[in-house]
């Protein structure tokens, strides 16, 4: 039976599923219920310095993108860090940690970019018995305008400086939470490393406007006729987060940096994918805000069953296993040729594959008078668009051809042979590809 226990930069938890810093971790009541449901850890909703109170808007805080079945695909928020008093949060963190010693309690922090502000908050957080801190350099709205959050996360020198202050002033492990609102994730990750971070977590939310109210001519969520950009998260951002995690995991200088992956994790499979790409654990926000704490039951059961099936005893056994297979485009094998195949029994003759291929791609799908669709191998470039637009899962698949395969109808080669493809001009370095 797979052992889901996790040790992330010395922080132990009963499983690798933590709740990300957000409303689900904003108070003791929530966190206790999350732990009772089975969550391995939490990153407490971001605390700020004592000072002027944080005040949230009273209008709607969220915008959303839905799938055709109204499943929530992307969530956008304009919420700030916690608006509850610091001392109350600290008391609650201490009480929760005392009662759940086997769960991870990490505290997210965002204070002004001054050493004194960090020196003031670190000891009071440490006193709660929390297992670690996460530096929120990611929030893209509200706090960034005050020189915090993403305003720090977009300047590698600031990341390095604040991380170093924290490492010098606390015994707790320091996780640096990165913003995706940058051009190259490697720069902030390297800065966190230089500052001595124990790990990075990513991603925080993505700058976004989810919709515009065309009657009011105003972005939504709309507060008294005005809107502002918010932070985008949920299933829609998972591909962006996975790429950034993989980039850090495969980049020589950052390859040893521990990663807590965040962004659209909704099922055990999402978690396994992030971990295969190098994450040590995952954090979840939107999925739990959509479905409630009990989704942890399916996540742990699913991950455990899959690990048993694959013979993995612990998450360390597969963490990072996909990283060597993430490469640059020029190292992809040009001799690998596939062609689309349509399962005629499964086909519902909707013609979407035909429309997509005929109008926008390579005219490789033929349609007979009685709407039977077929693939012309000599025209098919294996782009996979037909697979993706087909509404019937598994109806169109890609078949791998042998090198030198011929199209029997036209007697033309459909599988080009580039010989030693590592020597092809596309491939700048034969040795790197091996
Ligand atoms: C309403 C809301 C509030 C959030 N507040 C915080 C916060 O205070 N601190 C923080 O670091 N991240 C915050 N986040 C970002 C999440 O922790 C997480 O990074 C992001 O939502 C991506 O994960 P997901 O796709 O699972 O939601 C917030 C997200 C949402 C939706």
Image: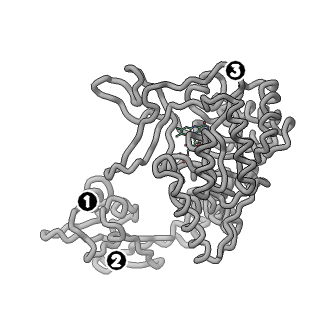
**Who is closer to the viewer here, 264 or 384?**
264
Which residue is painted at 69% across and 69% down in the image?
314
Name the mark on residue 51. 3
Query: Is 110 drawn above or below residue 172 in the view shown?
Result: above
The kind of secondary structure element at disc 2 is strand
**Quadrant in which ligand 1 is drawn:** top right
Name the mark on residue 374. none
Kindly identify which residue carries mark 1. 352
- Give the image location of residue 329, x and y in percent: 56, 57
Q: How is the image coloured?
A: one colour
* Some atom of ligand 1 lies within 8 Å of the CB belonging to the residue at label 3: no
Query: Is 213 drawn above or below residue 269 in the view shown?
Result: above
Residue neighbourhood size for the residue with mark 1, other residues' Cα within 10 Å, grouped as few (<14), some (14–19), many (≥20):
some
Residue 184 in view in this figure: no
- Say whether marks 3 and 2 touch (CB < 8 Å): no
Q: Which callout, 2 or 1, points at the residue further toward the start of the chain?
A: 1
Q: Nearer the viewer, mark 3 or mark 1?
A: 3
Query: Is 154 drawn above or below residue 400 in the view shown?
Result: above
- Give the image location of residue 381, x and y in percent: 39, 64
Q: Is residue 290 left or right of residue 190?
A: left
The kind of secondary structure element at disc 3 is loop
Kindly identify which residue carries mark 2. 407
- Give the image location of residue 423, x and y in percent: 61, 65
Distance between the alpha carbons at the discs numbered 2 and 1: 24 Å
Identify the image quadrant of residue 16: bottom right
Query: Is 64 drawn above or below residue 312 in the view shown?
Result: above
Residue neighbourhood size for the residue with mark 2, other residues' Cα within 10 Å, grouped as few (<14), some (14–19), many (≥20):
some
- Say whether marks 2 and 1 touch (CB < 8 Å): no
């Amino acid at each position: 039976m797979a052992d889901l226990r996790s040790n992330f930069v010395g922080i132990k938890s009963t499983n690798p599923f933590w709740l990300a810093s957000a409303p689900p971790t904003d108070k003791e009541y929530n966190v206790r219920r999350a732990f009772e449901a089975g969550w391995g850890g939490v990153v407490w909703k971001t605390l700020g310095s004592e000072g002027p109170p944080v005040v949230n808007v009273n209008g709607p805080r969220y915008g959303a993108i839905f799938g055709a079945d109204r499943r929530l695909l992307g969530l956008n928020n304009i919420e700030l860090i916690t608006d509850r008093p610091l001392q109350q949060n600290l008391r609650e963190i201490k009480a929760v940690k005392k009662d759940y010693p086997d769960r991870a309690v990490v505290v997210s922090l965002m204070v002004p970019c001054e050493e004194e502000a960090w020196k003031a908050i670190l000891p009071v957080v440490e006193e709660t018995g929390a297992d670690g801190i996460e530096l929120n350099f990611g929030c893209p709205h509200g706090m960034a305008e005050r020189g915090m959050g993403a305003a720090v996360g977009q300047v590698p020198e600031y990341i390095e400086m604040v991380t170093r202050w924290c490492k010098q002033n606390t015994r707790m492990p320091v996780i640096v939470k990165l913003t995706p609102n940058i051009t190259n994730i490697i720069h902030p990750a390297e800065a966190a490393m230089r500052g001595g971070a124990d790990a990075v977590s990513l991603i925080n939310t993505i700058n976004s406007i989810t919709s515009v109210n065309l009657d009011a001519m105003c972005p939504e969520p709309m507060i008294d006729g005005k809107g502002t950009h918010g932070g985008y998260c949920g299933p829609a951002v998972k591909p962006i987060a996975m790429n950034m995690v993989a980039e850090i995991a495969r980049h020589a200088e950052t390859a040893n940096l521990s990663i807590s992956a965040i962004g659209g994790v909704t099922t055990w499979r999402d978690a396994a994918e992030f971990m295969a790409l190098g994450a040590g654990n995952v954090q979840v926000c939107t999925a739990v805000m959509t479905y409630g704490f009990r989704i942890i039951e399916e996540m742990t059961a699913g991950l455990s069953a899959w690990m048993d099936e694959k013979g993995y005893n612990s998450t360390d056994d597969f963490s990072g296993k996909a990283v060597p297979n993430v490469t640059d485009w020029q190292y992809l094998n040009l001799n690998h040729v596939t062609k689309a195949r349509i399962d005629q029994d499964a086909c519902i003759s909707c013609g979407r594959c035909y429309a997509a291929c005929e109008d926008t791609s390579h005219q490789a799908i033929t349609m007979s008078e009685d709407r039977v669709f077929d693939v012309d191998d000599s025209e098919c470039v294996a782009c996979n668009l037909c697979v993706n637009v087909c509404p019937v899962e598994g109806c169109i698949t890609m078949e791998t051809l042998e090198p030198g395969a011929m199209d029997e109808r036209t007697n033309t080669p459909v599988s080009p042979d580039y010989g030693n493809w590592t020597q092809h001009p596309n491939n700048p370095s034969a040795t790197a590809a091996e």
